[in-house]
Structures are given as structure tokens and as C-alpha cells.
């Protein structure tokens, strides 16, 4: 290999090109291995046993029948499981004491020589409890409501500017409405699953998670070994949506079981076991009050959010944070209140906070547009701002208005008759709705390594996680351009905690964080090669962006979007169907148009599912969701998605990061449910403020005035 600069005289432009996914062939042919698909000698199988009571203590565990069952090797419970060190995540201190904090909490694990034997053994474990009274239902007058110290991840709980009460009272036009969302469950295609094995005091796990670096640290702490003694491999992950953002029960239970039986163990949670213990989106109760002058300019905004957490750990969803920066007004207030219930701890689900918060605010904006008599698109344009109302600083870029105007033009919005129930096609009432979207453009410190090989190829290594988004392909494209070589000369390795440390694939910050480190590593390698490093072996350079990312000015950075929906409602049955949906987004530089479009459409589809189908129904008597499979927890299917289009603006923002990218994994879901709810109102004249919009809430709309 020449010692000259890589790519000198070669024109490369991989970023922006629609390359197919690097692992696409492996996935469609079934050769891509997921967490429990790695071949391991001497493998055994684990099956988790959930608690049958909501709250109380275990008084007796009878394992005799289970241990007598053919193939069963062990039954782990609080009385015999290996000891764990108490850590910062109390939900992961599993099988350590007899306390039960919620129904479905994992209280035992059966290990057997086959999956069937493990399942049968779990059925035969007998557990007695001393049950205690419980509280599991979120209400706006619950006596346990309190103000948390902060909301996820570290936002102030409450904010206030001006005098909301006075501003609201003095306004000529006011909206005061309460919106409710139920529990939502992540349900990735691949369940939480792990293969674990101990060898000479070292732990190797193949795990389905969104960040192997953090999972390694958690396991090292719990099992009291050095991080170097733990390796976490996440080469392929079948989705996560936030539920796999940190170490969860499956990886801890599997590692415990493997240590106990001194053999490799595979454990995959069932679909039913994913409804709760691995996290879910909290139900919310949101009161939004908007005040405006006669021209529709906001004078006062208040967003009060109530949500739930568990008794074992606090998680406060940042529901009202969306409202702090979206539209301007001189008088503003946001609050969050929380109640501890005897339920599993809620956790991240795609766009936590912004997703439910946008549903409430963007629905209220639609109600305000009607009250003022102004087009909903125009209302949002009039209340745009170049300065973040929360921070008082200018945005690095804010193209919300451009998204609204581009979307209106593409959607044909200008021909819209604003009168509800004005359009009809036979028995179908037709309506259209719009909503804005925003999501923070974050980045976190990361590290990467770039290596030049004697044959002229390059290896780029980073512990990024591809959870099905096409992340490894995007990083590969960025690496090729940073090295100045055709992408075919670059090999990318991700998904292994032995690689340079990288942050979690979540918060729409993956590509922004990882590409930053990859670019810096590539630049450092090119500098080394300029200095004439002999080409008789591999030459490597490593970069860490901790100081650079941490030294960024605290300017408000957001991606934006505008969501448009056209629906039809059966005037007799109340059935709602989507005719078409359009999203236009401003999300910085798009690395790969194919995977970007997939992410945006995926988010919009989840928003459609949120609006019309998904609803976790909890039975207070048993403290558990009664619909805990995909037969009873309805999600959007292909037949529900008649036409969805995603477009984006050519946006450059040099304040972001070296690649100029903003996250796109979550902006697609933000505002989507509100656009559909607003379209339903336009079609029927009925405002549904508690999701989902089931047909029983609209049945007989033909008879309504």
C-alpha cells in the first residue's frame, strides 16, 4: 500500500447515496444471527417465572415437582441464586430477596436441557405469597402525586416565564382541554433475549440490547468483576424502540443461571412477558391551556402532565418538555407530577416525552385554530420563533415553517374546506389534519478506531449498535468519505463491547455521536499516513470525542417536521381508516435516503398505531395488563397503511457535528397521532381527547349535529 494520503485523487461521495444495507443479504437469507441463535456447545435453556401477585412477599418456594421433571437442571430463586451486588438499578437486583413489587416481576428461573423442559419446569414451580393491598391505576387526584426532582433524562420538572394565570385570564380566545394516553408497549420483533456463558471467571453474553458498552458496565457491577472480564456482543438486534436501552432482566437472569449451573444458558422472554417488566410508555393525563389574541398569536401556554412510576424505581417521563420550545408566548408554564404505583417501571419508548406531549399540544393547537377561525397551518406559522422560548437563545437551525409550507403544498392543503363534516364519499366522512413535530438533535461522546491495511483496504471499529435502522451502513458511508476512499474498500465492525466505546442507540443520537468519532479517527489515520508510516503492516488511529462533544456551546438543536393526514370515518359504525399520510422533515444531512425514509415512515406508522389501535388495558384487581399479546394488543398492520410518504428538506446546520446530521429515528412518530386525531375531528366534528380513537367513541356520528 502506498504511504500517500488515502483517497488522493479519488472522488468519493458515499454520504447521501442510497446504498442497500450491508447486512441485507444475511437478514433476508436468515444467516444473520440474533442473541439466542449463536451455536454453543453444552447449551441449556432458561425460562423466567413471573410473580402471580401484585405486591407482597414470597413465603415459600416449592421446587420439588419442577426438579423431578425430565430435563430440569435447576430452579433459581431468592433462596439459592448467586448473589448480586446492589447497584443503581434496583429492578436488576433479581432473585435476591422475597419482596414482590408488581405482578409479573421475575421471581424464579428454571434451567433445563431443552426449551420445552424449561417451560414445563416453570409451570411446576409452586410459590406462596403473603399478598398486600395494592394501587395500580393512574388518576389526576391520586393522593400519592408528587413533584419529582427532575424528568427524563435531566430536565427541570417545572418551568415558568411571565405570569401565566394573568395572561390566560386576559386573553380573548382560550382553550382548556385534558388529553389522555394509555400505556403503550414497545414489542420489538426480537424479544429480550440472551445467551450467556462463564469461562474462567469471564462472562460472555450475546444479548439483544441498544448499547453493549453500558450493558457491560452494569453486568460487571452486579457480578463484581472488572469490565474487562465481561464481553457483550450485539451484532444484530431485532428492534428495541427504547425498551433495550440499558441492561434489562433477561441478560441478568441468564447470566445468573449460567453461573449457577456452570453451563451456557439461552433465555428469551415470551411475548407475554414483554408487557411490563422490560418497560413501557407510561399512561399520561395532560391538561393544556392556550390563550391567544384575535389574530391567533399565543399569549399564554400551560402544559400540566401527570404520569406514573413504580415503587422500586423512579422514571419521570418528560411529557411537557415538548411544549417548552415548540411555540412562542410571553407567559408560559409547564409542570410534571408523578405517582408511585404497584406497577412495573415505565421506561423509554420511541420519542419518550415528545411523542405523548406532542399529541396533547398539537391537538390543542388545532382546537385553538378552530376557536380563532384561522387555518391550522397558518396558526403554527404565526407562532413560530427564531429564539428558543425555554433557553432564550437562537436555534442552530429551525425549519418548522419550511416543513409546514412544503407539506401543505405536497398534500394539497390549500383546497381544504375547514368546516367539519363538509366532505363525504358515500357512507364515509372525509377529514384532514395537520400537526407539527420536533425532537432534540443530541450527540454524546464516542470513540472509534480506523485501521489501514497493507492491501489498501480499511477497517473501522466502533461499538455502535444497529437495532435494525441501517446504522452500520450509515457509519460505513461516513467512514468512506472521511477516509477519502470508495466505500468498497472499507469494512465496518459494530456491536461488540470489545470495540471502542460508544453510546446507546437511542435518543436519535446514534449516527450523530458515532459518525463524529469515526470522522475524527479517519482524520487521525490520514494524518499518520501523511507522515510516511511504513506500509509493512497495519496502521491504526483511535479517536475519542469526549472533550469535543462536551465543549459544544449549549445552543438549542432540534429536528422539525410537519405531519399531514387524510382519514375517512364510517358514519354509521365509527370505523376510522387512513387514506393517506404525508410527513416533511428537516433533519440535517441525510446519510442514506433509503434507510432514512424507512425510519421516518416507520415512526409515522407507529404514530398511526398510537392514534387508532394501541392501548394497554390494566385490570386493577390483578395489577396486570389483560391484553398482553399481539392478538389482543392491536398494532397497525399493512392493511392499515394505505399511503404514507416521507420527504425531507435539504438542510445544512454546521453547528451540529462534523457530519451535519440530526437524528431521524424518533421525529417521525412525534405529532403523527395528533395529525390523525385532528383529521378525525375535521371529518366528524367529534373531538376525541383520549387515545386510541376507537370506533365506539365515534359510532353513530351520522346522527350527530
Image (cartoon, rainbow, N blue to C red):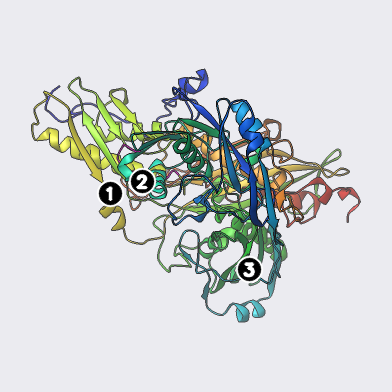
**Disc sitting over residue 513 in the figure:** 2
Q: Is residue 88 magenta?
A: no
Rounded to the nearest angstrom, the CA distance separating label 3 from label 1 is 47 Å
The quarter of the rendered structure image containing the C terminus is: bottom right
The residue wearing badge 3 is 295
- As measured in the structure, the alpha-carbon distance from the residue carrying label 2 to the one carrying label 3 is 42 Å
Depth order, front residue of 267/157: 267
Farthest residue, direction top? 29
* Image quadrant assignment for residue 181: bottom right
Dominant secondary structure, magenta? loop
406 over 26 or under it: above or below: below
- For label 3, the SS is loop
In the rendered image, the residue lying farthest to the right is: 703
The percent position of residue 281, horizontal first and vertical second, equals: 60, 51
Where residue 274 sits: x, y (%)? Answer: 61, 42
Identify the magenta region.
497-505
Callout 1–callout 2 Cβ contact below 8 Å: yes
Q: Is residue 432 visible?
A: yes
Q: Secondary structure at mark 2?
A: helix
Q: Nearer the viewer, mark 2 or mark 3?
A: 2
- Secondary element type, mark 1: loop
* Residue 288 sits above or below residue 106 on the image: below
Q: Position of residue 480 (x, y in %)?
A: 29, 31
Mark 3–mark 1 CB contact (< 8 Å) = no
Q: Residues within 10 Å of mark 1 (few under 14, many from 20)?
A: many
Disc 1 marks which residue?
Answer: 545
Gap in Å between the C-alphas at discs 1 and 2?
9 Å
First reached walking from the N terminus: tag 3 or tag 1: 3
> For the residues carrying marks 3 and 1, which lies nearer the camera in this image?
1
Residue shown at 44% from the left, 38% from the top: 259
* Left or right: 298 in relation to 472: right
**Mark 2 in CB contact with mark 3 (< 8 angstroms):** no
Amino acid at each position: 500500500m502506498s504511504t500517500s494520503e488515502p483517497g488522493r485523487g479519488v472522488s468519493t461521495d458515499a454520504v447521501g447515496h442510497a446504498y442497500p444495507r450491508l447486512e441485507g443479504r444475511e437478514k433476508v437469507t436468515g444467516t444473520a444471527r440474533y442473541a439466542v441463535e449463536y451455536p454453543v456447545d453444552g447449551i441449556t435453556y432458561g425460562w423466567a417465572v413471573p410473580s402471580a401477585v401484585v405486591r407482597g412477599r414470597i413465603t415459600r418456594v416449592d421446587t420439588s415437582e419442577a426438579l423431578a421433571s425430565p430435563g430440569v437442571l435447576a430452579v433459581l430463586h431468592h433462596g439459592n441464586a448467586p448473589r448480586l451486588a446492589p447497584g443503581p438499578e434496583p429492578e436488576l437486583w433479581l432473585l435476591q430477596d422475597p419482596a414482590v413489587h408488581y405482578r409479573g416481576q421475575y421471581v424464579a428461573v428454571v434451567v433445563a436441557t431443552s426449551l420445552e423442559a424449561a417451560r414445563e419446569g416453570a409451570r411446576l414451580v409452586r410459590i406462596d405469597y403473603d399478598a398486600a393491598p395494592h394501587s395500580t391505576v393512574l388518576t389526576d387526584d391520586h393522593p400519592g402525586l408528587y413533584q419529582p426532582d427532575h424528568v427524563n433524562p435531566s430536565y427541570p420538572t417545572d418551568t415558568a416565564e411571565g405570569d401565566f394565570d394573568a395572561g390566560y385570564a386576559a386573553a380573548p380566545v382560550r382553550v382548556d382541554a385534558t388529553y389522555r394516553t394509555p400505556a403503550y408497549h414497545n414489542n420489538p420483533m426480537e424479544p429480550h433475549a440472551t445467551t450467556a456463558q462463564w469461562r474462567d471467571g469471564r462472562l460472555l453474553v450475546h444479548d439483544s440490547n441498544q448499547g453493549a458498552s453500558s450493558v457491560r458496565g452494569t453486568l460487571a457491577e452486579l457480578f463484581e468483576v472488572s469490565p474487562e472480564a465481561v464481553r457483550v456482543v450485539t451484532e444484530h438486534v431485532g428492534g428495541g424502540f427504547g425498551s433495550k436501552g440499558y441492561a434489562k432482566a433477561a441478560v441478568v437472569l441468564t447470566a445468573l443461571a449460567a453461573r449457577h449451573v456452570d453451563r451456557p444458558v439461552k433465555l428469551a422472554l415470551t411475548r407475554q412477558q414483554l408487557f411490563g417488566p422490560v418497560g413501557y410508555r407510561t399512561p399520561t393525563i395532560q391538561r393544556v391551556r392556550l390563550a391567544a389574541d384575535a389574530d391567533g398569536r399565543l399569549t399564554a401556554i400551560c402544559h400540566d402532565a401527570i404520569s406514573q412510576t413504580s415503587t422500586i424505581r423512579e422514571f419521570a417521563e418528560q411529557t411537557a418538555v415538548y411544549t417548552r420550545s415548540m411555540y412562542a408566548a410571553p407567559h408560559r408554564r409547564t409542570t410534571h407530577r408523578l405517582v408511585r404505583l404497584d406497577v412495573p417501571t415505565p421506561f423509554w419508548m420511541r420519542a419518550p416525552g415528545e411523542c405523548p406531549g406532542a399529541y396533547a399540544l398539537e391537538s390543542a393547537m388545532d382546537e385553538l385554530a378552530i376557536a380563532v377561525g384561522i387555518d391550522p397551518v397558518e396558526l403554527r406559522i404565526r407562532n413560530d420563533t427564531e429564539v428558543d422560548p425555554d433557553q432564550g437563545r437562537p436555534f442552530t437551525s429551525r425549519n418548522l415553517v419550511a416543513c409546514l409550507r412544503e407539506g401543505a403544498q405536497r398534500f394539497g392543503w390549500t383546497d381544504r374546506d375547514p368546516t367539519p363534516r363538509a366532505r363525504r364519499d358515500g357512507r364515509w366522512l372525509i377529514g384532514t389534519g395537520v400537526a407539527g413535530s420536533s425532537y432534540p438533535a443530541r450527540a454524546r461522546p464516542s470513540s472509534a478506531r480506523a485501521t489501514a491495511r497493507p492491501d489498501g483496504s480499511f477497517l473501522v471499529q466502533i461499538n455502535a449498535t444497529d437495532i435494525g435502522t441501517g446504522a452500520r451502513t450509515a457509519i460505513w458511508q461516513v467512514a468512506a468519505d472521511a477516509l477519502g476512499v470508495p466505500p468498497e474498500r472499507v469494512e465496518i465492525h459494530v456491536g461488540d463491547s470489545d470495540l471502542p466505546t460508544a453510546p446507546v442507540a437511542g435518543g436519535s443520537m446514534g449516527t450523530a455521536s458515532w459518525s463524529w468519532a469515526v470522522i475524527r479517527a479517519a482524520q487521525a489515520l490520514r494524518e499518520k499516513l501523511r507522515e510516511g508510516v511504513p506500509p509493512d503492516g497495519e496502521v491504526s488511529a483511535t479517536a475519542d470525542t469526549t472533550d469535543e462533544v462536551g465543549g459544544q456551546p449549549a445552543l438549542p438543536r432540534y429536528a422539525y417536521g410537519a405531519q399531514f393526514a387524510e382519514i375517512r370515518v364510517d358514519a354509521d359504525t365509527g370505523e376510522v381508516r387512513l387514506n393517506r399520510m404525508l410527513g416533511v422533515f428537516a433533519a440535517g444531512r441525510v446519510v442514506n435516503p433509503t434507510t432514512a425514509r424507512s425510519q421516518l415512515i416507520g415512526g409515522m406508522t407507529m404514530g398511526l398505531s398510537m392514534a387508532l389501535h394501541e392501548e394497554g388495558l390494566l385490570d386493577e384487581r390483578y395489577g396486570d395488563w389483560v391484553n398482553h399479546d399481539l392478538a389482543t394488543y392491536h398494532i397497525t398492520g399493512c392493511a392499515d397503511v394505505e399511503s404514507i410518504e416521507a420527504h425531507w428538506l435539504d438542510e445544512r446546520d454546521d453547528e451540529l457535528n462534523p457530519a451535519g446530521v440530526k437524528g431521524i429515528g424518533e421525529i417521525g412518530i412525534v405529532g403523527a397521532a395528533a395529525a390523525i386525531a385532528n383529521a378525525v375531528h375535521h371529518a366528524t366534528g367529534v373531538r376525541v381527547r383520549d387515545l386510541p380513537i376507537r370506533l365506539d367513541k365515534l359510532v353513530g356520528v351520522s346522527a350527530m349535529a
